[in-house]
Image (cartoon, helix red, strand yellow):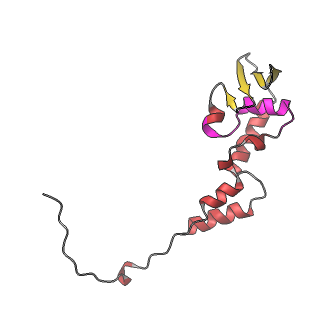
Amino acid sequence: MVRFYEKWTEADKLNDIITPYARENLTMNEKEARKRQVIHGRRRWYETVDQGGVKFLVNADDATYDCGMWQMTGLPCKHVVAMLMYNREHAHHRVHWYYSKQAWKMAYDGNINPIPDESRWPEFESQTIEPPV
């Protein structure tokens, strides 16, 4: 009960549209993205090249990426963030809804009813239920 209240209150006071976890992840990836070169291919296909020359393909239209990290986690990785920065897009717009403030609040919006102390539970007279033979 206490955890639900604390988490909901934390989410309610949040002055961001994404969770602190997602923001921290994006901030780290934005720093790393600056070290990548972005090459624009046809339409919305991009190639990002890291400092070691390793290339990764990003499709901006269907939010897919070579390694699958973006698809699996819903958080743009450093290569996707590099492509977004190249296009002057904000990375937080490409974060999955699951990491939004609204989703975070909804996760803790339910209620857990308190249970009285066991000494206050009503007495029941019933048969002992035996396991099947």
Q: Quadrant of the C terminus?
A: bottom left
| Residue 12 position by quadrant | bottom right
Residue 17 image position (x, y, % from top left): 76, 53
- For this orientation, the residue located farthest to the top is 53
Is 119 displayed left or right of 37 in the figure?
left
Position in image of residue 97 (x %, y %): 68, 48
Residue 25 shown in magenta:
no
Q: Give residue 91's quadrant in the image.
A: top right
Instruction: Specify the quadrant of the image occupied by residue 47.
Output: top right
From the image, which quarter does the N terminus lie in? bottom right
Q: Residue at x 61, y 68 (%)?
A: 5
Question: At 58% across and 65% down in the image, what residue appears?
Answer: 4
Q: Position of residue 89 (x, y in %)?
A: 84, 37
Q: Nearer the viewer, residue 53 or 100?
A: 100
Left or right: 92 in relation to 117: right
- How many numbered dots are placed on residues in this image? 0
Return the residue found at the far right: 88
What type of secondary structure mainly makes up the magenta span?
Answer: helix
For residue 87: magenta? Answer: yes
Residue found 69% across the figure and 57% down from its top: 102
Residue shown at the point (62%, 30%) measured from the top left: 68
Q: Which residues are magenta?
A: 72-89
Depth check: give the residue in front, 6 or 18. Answer: 18
In the displayed structure image, the side of residue 96 where residue 34 appears, left or right: right
Q: Is residue 42 above or below residue 11?
A: above
Q: Position of residue 115 (x, y in %)?
A: 44, 76
Question: Is 108 situated above or below 128?
Answer: above
Q: Is residue 78 above or below residue 111?
A: above
